[in-house]
Amino acid sequence: MTPWFDPSLVFVGGAWRPCASGETLPVIDPSTGVEIARIARGSATDIDAAVTAAEAALSGDWGAMPAFQRGRILARLGQMVLDHIDQLAQMEATDVGKPLTQARNDVIALARYCEFYAGAADKLMGETIPFQPGFTVYTLREPHGVTGHIVPWNYPMQIIGRSVGAALATGNACVLKPAEEACLTALAFADLAHKAGLPPGALNVVPGLGAEAGAALTAHPGIRHISFTGSVATGRRVQAATAENVVPVTLELGGKSPQLVFADADLNAALPFLVNAGIQNAGQTCSASSRILVERSVYAEVCDRMAEAYRALTTGPAMADLRTGPLISARQKGIVERYLAMADPAHILARGQLAPDLPPGGHYIAPALIAGPAPDHPLAQEEIFGPVQIILPFEDEEDAIRIANGTLYGLVASVWSRHGGRQMRLAKRLRAGQVFINNYGAAGGVELPFGGTGLSGHGREKGFEALYAFTTLKTVAAHHG
Ligand code: NAD
């Protein structure tokens, strides 16, 4: 997989150029541990140049462009993404280590975000407000200005689609800092956006380290909004930095999302979701379902059936396109292994299988299903970010809610039950930004607002809701007598 652009450059003001320091960072293929490319080590100087280019775009063609025209560019971009599906999927699979089919799904999701926000661009409206006689009062939704986007390595294309897509649709100019572990598709996206007709400076991409390019972006006084997706620890730093400039921030952080399985559930329908939501992308998914809570009377049966499904899981290189690929890095593998070491070996119900002849430099872990640590055990409380699921029994609805809501996170939850009243009660009482009933994740749903509570963050992206987040509201009160 060789990118069609030079990945060692930054994309600023509609052109490729070396970063100010001229230094580069390695791109490692997690399936093999082998370096496959170099990316720019962007710094504060490059971020400053990107913000300047974005400001110029806002006072030039981009700022003057009517909303429907922005939509047309996004629509063209969505089509170009689909036209490059093979290259983009291979690039993402090699860079992130995710199985090729999952990477293809991410390309499709990126195109869907472009399409959705293309259609929405000219449909965001203000209101007229009944006020006193002699006044006409209305609201205008205006772009923030230059928006900063900090993206993690696990789903680069999807996260870029949902945040940059909405920000461009509403007329902001973006500076994107992708993750140092995986940023090839971010650069590819910028190249395609340029070719789709996005004016210079409307989207700038500066790869680099979090503590350097990332911190410089969050602290830059020209940035008017930050969208951050990543860990809780970094989210805290980002929020503190944006507080200095009194700038709004959306934080999409981690989770410990539960699926609640009641005895009356359709277990055949639930089973694939119970397993897949935990192991997709090798569990490196913010909305992974890492806790399965099961009503006591069917607990043994669900344990058995999930264990059987786990034993059939295979793990191997991204291009082998098995159920799970490697973890992103040796560091991430080490974190997951430390959590696994906390488990009582007798409680490990099942492991998946590692494919034979794995490349020795890859970061592989066979998925693990662990039964019954106490709900307050670190395994049941902390985000592991690997292919590890915890399965716990509950006694009744009240107990289920207590355990489900008993972590500091609140991103996603699901309820498996045929009982309508219970579905509605739980949907209200579960602490989460999204609740699914008899499904999990709704196939990604670009139309569905997404975000968390508690340590999972605040603010919403995706759907129409993101358009409100990426605009600021102005009230105009005209006194005409
Ligand atoms: P991370 O916080 O280390 O890195 C995320 C991004 O932040 C990267 O681009 C990184 O370079 C940048 N960054 C690091 N330090 C920075 C700083 N001081 N200032 C500004 N930017 C900085 O997270 P990670 O380990 O790459 O990603 C895994 C975490 O992200 C998990 O906790 C996961 O749950 C979370 N995540 C959440 C979502 C969501 O939508 N809620 C999606 C994906 C990942």
Image: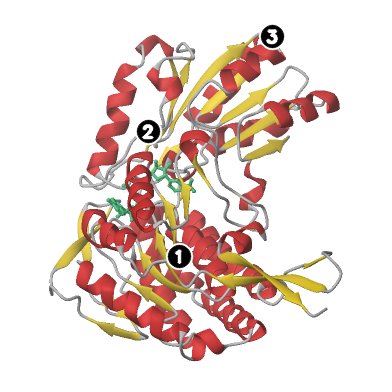
Among the two numbered marks 1 and 3 on one chain, the one whose residue lies closer to the N terminus: 1
Residue that badge 3 annotates: 297
Residue type at mark 1? Ala
Q: Which residue is mark 1?
A: 89
Which image quarter: residue 381?
top left
- Badge 3 residue CB within 8 Å of ligand 1: no
Is 164 displayed left or right of 363 in the figure? right
Do we see residue 217 in this rendering? yes
Q: Amino acid at mark 2?
A: Ala
Q: Earlier in the sequence, mark 2 or mark 1?
A: 1
Query: In this rendering, would 15 be left or right of 351?
Result: left
Q: CA distance from mark 1 to mark 3?
A: 43 Å
Q: Is residue 186 above or below residue 398?
A: below
Circle 2 is placed at which residue position? 366
Q: Residue at x 27, y 57 (%)?
A: 215
Q: Amino acid at mark 3?
A: Ser
Tell me the quadrant of the picture where the N terminus can be found.
bottom left
Look at the numbered disc 2 and give the secondary structure of its residue.
loop
Pick the front one: 436 or 213: 213
Q: Position of residue 224 (x, y in %)?
A: 44, 66
> What residue is rendered at 19% in x and 66% in y?
41
Image location (x, y in percent) of residue 134: 84, 74
How far apart are the alpha carbons under marks 2 and 3? Answer: 29 Å
Asked which quadrant contains residue 9, the reply is bottom left
Residue that extends furthest to the bottom in the rendered view of this protein: 61
